[in-house]
Amino acid sequence: MSKVFSLSEAASIALHGIILIAREKEGLNVIKIAERTSTSKHHVAKVMQRLVKAGYLTSQRGPSGGFSLKKKAEDISFLELYEVIEGVIEISTCPMDKPICPFDKCIFKNVTSKLTLEFKNYLQEQTVDQYIQ
Amino acid sequence: MSKVFSLSEAASIALHGIILIAREKEGLNVIKIAERTSTSKHHVAKVMQRLVKAGYLTSQRGPSGGFSLKKKAEDISFLELYEVIEGVIEISTCPMDKPICPFDKCIFKNVTSKLTLEFKNYLQEQTVDQYIQ
DNA sequence: TACATTTGAGCATTTAATTACCAGAATTAC
DNA sequence: GTAATTCTGGTAATTAAATGCTCAAATGTA
């Protein structure tokens, strides 16, 4: 069984982690995020670091430390978070990575760019506050 | 820059390779396929072997040997070739690989299954003969 | 100040994909 | 029959990405 779309665990941690943080009044620490997302604390720590550097979270060291939102939940889109981790989404026609296509007629025409755009738009529309409830 | 969709080089070789073979009257050998797809002959050889075993190609050893189609070009869909290489495409809601989602509301709802299905349908509709010209 | 807690940062390990290598078997041409 | 060509199949090396580990730095508490 193969997946056409797949999220890296890093991106998954970023999205789920920030929602978990947004749901808490107090900060949330690495251990708790790791538990609630069934991932390793090391990986969570690394991802959270990147979100801190990118300006989405503030971190607090020491006892009762952890992470909290730096921006308003309604101002954080999934797209921004996704692109912090994965890099800017490229809307390319060709899913291959060859400099030059040997074919005059691309075998994927516009399908991949169309679907990528649909996915990107979805990410753009979703904001963290929609998942606080 | 990141890609949402990406084809493995192996899948790319399978699809492009079989089209190149279909365009030839005589067979086409590993070296030529590798040249025309800008890939390594070793990788091409591996992929072609799999397509032979899966019944899509016949191989001919010796001088002026190479590969030729075993089935009619109009009877070979991209989907079959893709799935020989990547495995059967899974239509799952969640692009993550956790056994249990910690959220009551999946953050990807039906987007990924919808887009995966669209991609799968596209692959299903494309047959090799459409690219012989 | 001493201590426990927590993040920060760099390095190490693991994994998957790709690429390379090599000996063997089949085929063709001469 | 011999030599050159080409696929076959197994294994190894390489690479890049993801994941994991360790210790240092910072913070809060008593």
Image (cartoon, coloured by chain):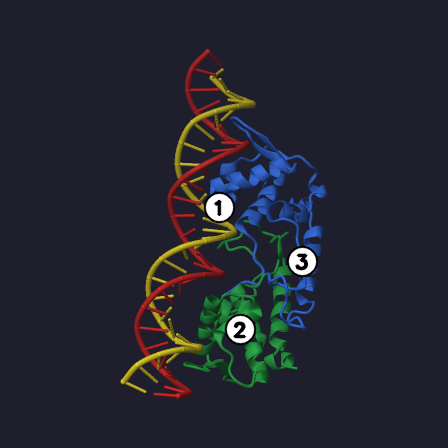
Chain colours: A green, B blue, C yellow, D red
Residue A131 is situated, as x and y percent measured from the top left of the image, at 63, 78
Mark 3 chain: B
- Residue A110 in sight in this render: no
Element at badge 3?
Answer: helix
Select label 3 or label 1 by which is in front.
3
Residue type for callout 2: Ile
> Marks 3 and 1, how far apart in space?
25 Å
> On the rendered image, what quadrant is the C terminus of chain B found in?
top right
Select label 2 or label 1 by which is in front.
2
Looking at the image, is A11 positioned above or below residue B117?
below
Q: Would residue B77 be found to the left or right of residue A104 on screen?
A: right
B30 and B47: which is toward the camera = B47
> Marks 2 and 1, how far apart in space?
43 Å
Which residue is at 61% across, 65% downward? A116
Which residue is at 51% across, 79% downward? A28
The residue indicated by pointer 1 is B39
| Label 3 and label 1 in one chain | yes
Which disc is residue B119 wearing?
Answer: 3
The residue indicated by pointer 2 is A33
CB atoms of marks 3 and 2 within 8 Å: no
The disc, 3 or 1, on the residue closer to the chain's N-terminal end is 1
Mark 1 chain: B
Residue type for callout 3: Phe
Residue type for callout 1: Thr
Mark 2 chain: A
